[in-house]
Image (cartoon, helix red, strand yellow):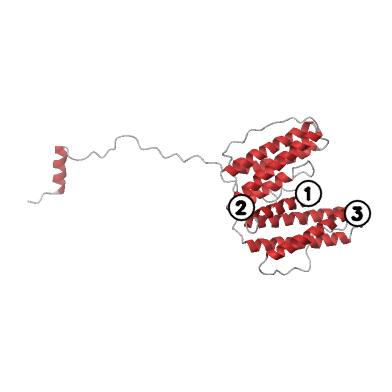
Amino acid sequence: MKVRRRALLAALAVAGCVPDPTVDGSPAPAATPPAPTQAPAAASVAEAFERLAAAVRAGSGVAGQGYEAWADAAGAALDAVMSRLLAEDPVAGGEEVFERPASPESAPGDRQAAARVLADASDAAVAAAVAGALDATDQPLRLLYASAACSARGLRRAAVPPVPGDAEPGHFQATSDQAAVAVALSHTWALIYGLGVGLGRLDSDDDLHALGSVRLIEAKELRNRLREELTSPVDQPASFELPTPMSTPDEIRAGWGALELDLLEGIGRLVAAGGGEPDQRLDLMLAQADAVSAMDHPLPHWPGWA
């Protein structure tokens, strides 16, 4: 005889054989994501930059007129770097998830002592950032550390205050080494052209003429070096658009400074590409940051980022 399903279930219910659909106990808690871990390079650079910030503050009591305004601008530049180093992803930025390093305050006795403290702290910050750039395995992070090194280099002495600038770090598609060399070469050509125009409009006994003459020799040496790194020749334009009219010494200096900053951006991508001799390219970028400062042109918070 065929037993109907409904009758069978009813019999099982009477016998107490139907399982209880309820589940005893509370649901398992959601897994807690692991806390982020700061990269050793970021931690090292953050500590060095905090010491540099302390050195900047230490000079306020003994430095000369105008130092306070420079120190405020320097502090803003250092904060811009620090905020990235304390983020989970320094290149992308965002919320600071790591603690700011302790601030080692000092009190130099005079202006010369304050200058030495500042220079030493700058050198240490540059060294830490260069080490981070050499250890970085991707282009954006390499450029971030190289840029931080240039920023610290620009604060070795109280001179032209840094400015926020128009660019900041962000992830970008990797470029080839040859493409980066070509870009750096084009900026070098533009600088050589601008130097030539300016020199032709300055008196030979002008101090700016002497500065430009030396820089022209250096720029031509860089041009030759970059040409040698190219596997295929690149055509040089006959002329370049100048950033200022260059009709007065002030316009010439400002124009040269803008062209030097453009070249710094080109060399930044050259460093990011990671080809050639990485340590030599980093030295070249630091020297280019010095060239910008030599023209009394302000460095942005993120030198080398375009």
Report which residue position mark 3 lands on: 206
Q: Position of residue 6 (x, y in %)?
A: 16, 46
Element on which disc 2 rests: helix
What's the CA distance linking mark 1 and mark 3?
19 Å
What's the CA distance linking mark 2 and mark 1?
24 Å
Which amino acid type is marked by label 1? Ser
Q: Residues within 10 Å of mark 3 (few under 14, many from 20)?
A: few
In which image quadrant can residue 84 be found? top right
What's the CA distance linking mark 2 and mark 3?
41 Å
In the image, 204 versus 252, the foreground residue is 204
Q: Position of residue 196 (x, y in %)?
A: 84, 62
Which amino acid type is marked by label 3? Asp
In which image quadrant can residue 31 be found? top left
- 31 left or right of 81 in image: left
- 209 left or right of 191 in image: right
Report which residue position mark 1 lands on: 293
Q: Position of residue 37 (x, y in %)?
A: 53, 41
For marks 2 and 1 on the same chain, the one whose residue lies earlier in the sequence: 2
Quick check: 90 above or below 251?
Answer: above
Quick check: 278 above or below 19?
Answer: below
Report which residue position mark 2 lands on: 140
Q: Position of residue 87 (x, y in %)?
A: 58, 42
Query: Can residue 210 be spotted in the picture?
Result: yes
Residue pictured at 70% horizontal, 38% vertical: 52
In which image quadrant can residue 82 be found? top right
For marks 2 and 3 on the same chain, the one whose residue lies earlier in the sequence: 2
